[in-house]
Image (cartoon, rainbow, N blue to C red):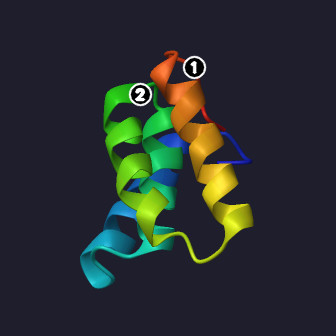
Amino acid sequence: MAQKKNAEAMEIFELNAKVHPDTWPVHVGLARGHSALGHYQEALAEAKLALPQAPDEGNRRTVQGMIDKLSQGKDAN
């Protein structure tokens, strides 16, 4: 994504989701990927799945920040 290859990044996030379903880092990756593509509702859904799985308070705050931005229709990246 840093190289602005958002579609390619999303393909990797989706592959990762198939290999490691329903895990915190996968949901965060999918949220970031969807957000970068402008799919804010899909990104929001993934971020909401990630929030209760976050391993610590710092990560919970980060994911909550993503949720707040996405809820406002803004890119979370």
For label 2, the residue is 40
Across and down, in percent, residue 38 comes to: 45, 25
Using the image as rendered, state which of residue 72 and residue 10 is in the foreground.
72
Across and down, in percent, residue 41 comes to: 33, 29
Give the vertical position of 2 relative to 39 (above or below). below
User: Which residue is painted at 31% across and 37% down in the image?
Assistant: 42
For label 1, the residue is 74
Q: Amino acid at mark 2?
A: Tyr
User: Which residue is painted at 54% across and 42% down in the image?
Assistant: 6
Say whether residue 3 is left or right of residue 17: right
Q: Secondary structure at mark 1?
A: loop
Say whether residue 58 is left or right of residue 25: right
Q: Quadrant of residue 56?
A: bottom right
User: The C terminus appears in which quarter of the rendering?
Assistant: top right
Lower position in the chain sequence, tag 2 or tag 1: 2
Say whether residue 73 is left or right of residue 46: right
- Residue 51: tell me if it is visible: yes
Using the image as rendered, state which of residue 77 and residue 52 is in the foreground.
52
Across and down, in percent, residue 70 comes to: 50, 28
